[in-house]
Image (cartoon, rainbow, N blue to C red):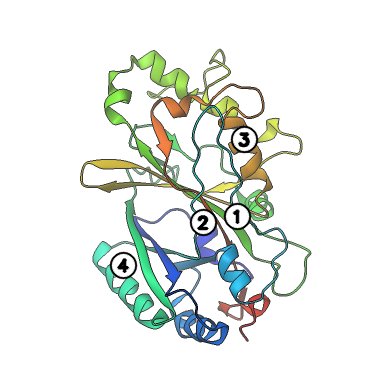
Amino acid sequence: MPLYQPGILEGVPRVARYVLFTIAGEQQPAGAIRAALQRASPLVDGRDVVIGIGPLLVQALGGDIPGLHDVPDFSGPVKVPATPGQLWCWVRGDDLGDLLHVTRKLQKALVPAFALRHVTDAFRHRHDAASGFGRDLTGFEDGTENPHGDAALQAAFVHGQGEGLDGASFVAVQQWVHDLDAFDAMPEDEQNHAIGRRLSDNEEIDDAPASAHVKRTAQESFDPEAFVLRRSMPWMASTQAGLMFVAFGKSHAAFEAQMRRMAGLDDGIVDGVFRLSRPVTGAYYWCPPMRAGQLDLRRIGCP
């Protein structure tokens, strides 16, 4: 059995829910929090439900996860908000109604120690079964530069740190809201140069400007290289829509290197993606490893 939550390595599902829970009330005994997590654990198989634990929750339980911390301030030329979370669940499947019932089961297992804070529903858009890639709501292919095979395992999961840590992953989660009217009003050349690929065939544009998204985030251009495993999905609620950006890594370092460059903190050049979208949330979580098919929560005091 793998040490990692297998849903992280699998491709994005047909539909998903991003469910946030927070510790209920001003104070909860650590024992009550651990009991709630243990009640919920049988519902978290790491495939249909992937779980992430925020720094504040780890602290409340007296745990120690090397490398886990809150999102730093990336704001500069553009606003990049930090909205720390406590317990994050990525509920995955083929039928949104089924995911509703899974969400209800999680909620019932976690009360009274936790309260449901927010749910975002997401979906695949124009998914290509042959390539395994889907499209952002702008029409651009998402995840083109994802690592595969052993490279994905090396990028996404902790190795060589010992029991209770190996197989874990650090995930960055941001909700981006698209300005689709602004995007539609851009000439096609401007759309392509904002991303650095042609919308028509996904080919990279050699003479794209330095602000093009693919140039800002070229993973091999960092020192050290900044590879992450992206598992982003489009979302929609009423008239708003955008991308739930989700990036798993063996640490937060690769995401932070990319985000600093995107936000213009390194050289003052802001990523072209900010012309058509903006982040409204930003949080880090630790996705615990698995042991014998069950969540391994030893590092936060759960047997």
Q: Residue at x 35, y 35 (%)?
A: 178
Q: Earlier in the sequence, mark 1 or mark 3?
A: 1
Relative side of 18 to 272, left or right:
left
Residue 292 pos. (x, y %): 61, 81
The amino acid on which the numbered mark 4 sits, given as a three-letter code, is: Leu
Quadrant occupied by the N terminus = bottom right
Whether residue 202 is visible: no
What residue would you read off at disc 4?
99
Front residue (pair 157, 246): 246
Disc ID at residue 260:
3
The crowding category of the residue bearing disc 1, from other C-alpha atoms within 10 Å (few below 14, some 14 to 19, many at least 20), is: some
The amino acid on which the numbered mark 2 sits, given as a three-letter code, is: Pro
> Gap in Å between the C-alphas at discs 3 and 4?
35 Å
> Gap in Å between the C-alphas at discs 1 and 3?
15 Å
The crowding category of the residue bearing disc 2, from other C-alpha atoms within 10 Å (few below 14, some 14 to 19, many at least 20), is: some
Front residue (pair 125, 17): 17
The amino acid on which the numbered mark 3 sits, given as a three-letter code, is: Arg
The crowding category of the residue bearing disc 4, from other C-alpha atoms within 10 Å (few below 14, some 14 to 19, many at least 20), is: many
Q: Earlier in the sequence, mark 4 or mark 1?
A: 1
> Gap in Å between the C-alphas at discs 4 and 2?
24 Å
The amino acid on which the numbered mark 1 sits, given as a three-letter code, is: Asp
> Gap in Å between the C-alphas at discs 2 and 3?
18 Å
Helix, strand or loop under label 2: loop
Label pair 1/2, CB-CB below 8 angstroms: yes
